[in-house]
């Protein structure tokens, strides 16, 4: 049995938040997806970014405002947000306690492949 135990020191500053990467479990093994627990402090916002993977955020605790390609929505615990590849996204903590969520990403295709499959795509 493999268990990755909670360790507050395993969180690193990435994307304007605290990120604890879960998968790939160790860098020597290939994984078809990646995931991590993310914490955004009250009043803070993750860095707007995009990538060639699809991604989902599952809000665990707290509340905030998600921004995807300039469109915003409030989010609350147990909300699930899906991002298409290359969509620019950020999450702002509007509450007075930590906003915690699970991020899962998969299916990196690379820019050239995505452009071929989505002929109307513009960067």
Image (tube, helix red, strand yellow):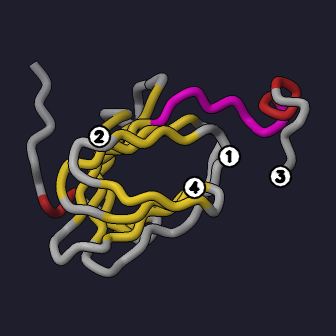
Specify the quadrant of the image occupied by residue 97. Answer: bottom left
Residue 30 appears anywhere in the view: no
Q: Earlier in the sequence, mark 1 or mark 2?
A: 2
Q: Earlier in the sequence, mark 4 or mark 2?
A: 2
Q: Earlier in the sequence, mark 3 or mark 2?
A: 2
For label 4, the SS is: strand
For label 3, the SS is: loop
Circles 3, 2 touching at the beta carbon (< 8 Å) = no
Does residue 108 sit above or below 68 in this rendering?
A: above
Estimate the spatial distance between the alpha carbons at disc 3 and disc 2, rounded to whole Å: 30 Å
Q: Nearer the viewer, mark 4 or mark 1?
A: 4
Report which residue position mark 3 lands on.
123
Q: Earlier in the sequence, mark 1 or mark 3?
A: 1
Circles 1, 3 touching at the beta carbon (< 8 Å) = yes
Q: Which residue shows up at 83% across the image and 29% down it?
A: 118
Estimate the spatial distance between the alpha carbons at disc 4 and disc 2, rounded to whole Å: 24 Å
Report which residue position mark 1 lands on.
86
Estimate the spatial distance between the alpha carbons at disc 1 and disc 2, rounded to whole Å: 22 Å
Does residue 45 sit above or below 51 in this rendering?
A: below
Q: Position of residue 64 (x, y in %)?
A: 33, 65
Query: Image quadrant for the N terminus?
Result: top left
Report which residue position mark 4 lands on.
68
Estimate the spatial distance between the alpha carbons at disc 3 and disc 4, rounded to whole Å: 15 Å
Q: Nearer the viewer, mark 1 or mark 2?
A: 1
Q: Earlier in the sequence, mark 4 or mark 1?
A: 4
Label 2 Cα neighbours within 10 Å, binned few <14 / some 14-19 / many ≥20: some
Q: Position of residue 54 (x, y in %)?
A: 56, 35
Q: Which residue shows up at 25% across the image and 77% down it?
A: 42
Circles 1, 2 touching at the beta carbon (< 8 Å) = no
Inspect the magenta stretch and tell me whether residue 28 lies in it.
Answer: no
Report which residue position mark 2 lands on.
22
Specify the quadrant of the image occupied by residue 108. Answer: top right
């Amino acid at each position: 049995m493999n268990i990755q135990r909670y360790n507050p020191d395993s969180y690193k500053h990435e994307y304007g938040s605290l990120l604890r990467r879960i998968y790939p479990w160790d860098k020597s093994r290939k994984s078809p997806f990646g995931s991590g627990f993310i914490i955004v402090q009250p009043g803070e916002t993750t860095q707007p970014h995009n990538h060639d993977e699809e991604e989902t955020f599952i809000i665990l605790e707290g509340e905030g405002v998600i921004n995807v390609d300039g469109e915003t929505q409030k989010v609350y615990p147990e909300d699930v947000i899906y991002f298409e590849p290359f969509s620019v996204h950020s999450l702002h903590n509007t509450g007075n306690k930590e906003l915690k969520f699970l991020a899962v990403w998969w299916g990196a295709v690379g820019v050239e492949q995505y452009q071929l499959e989505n002929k109307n795509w513009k960067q």
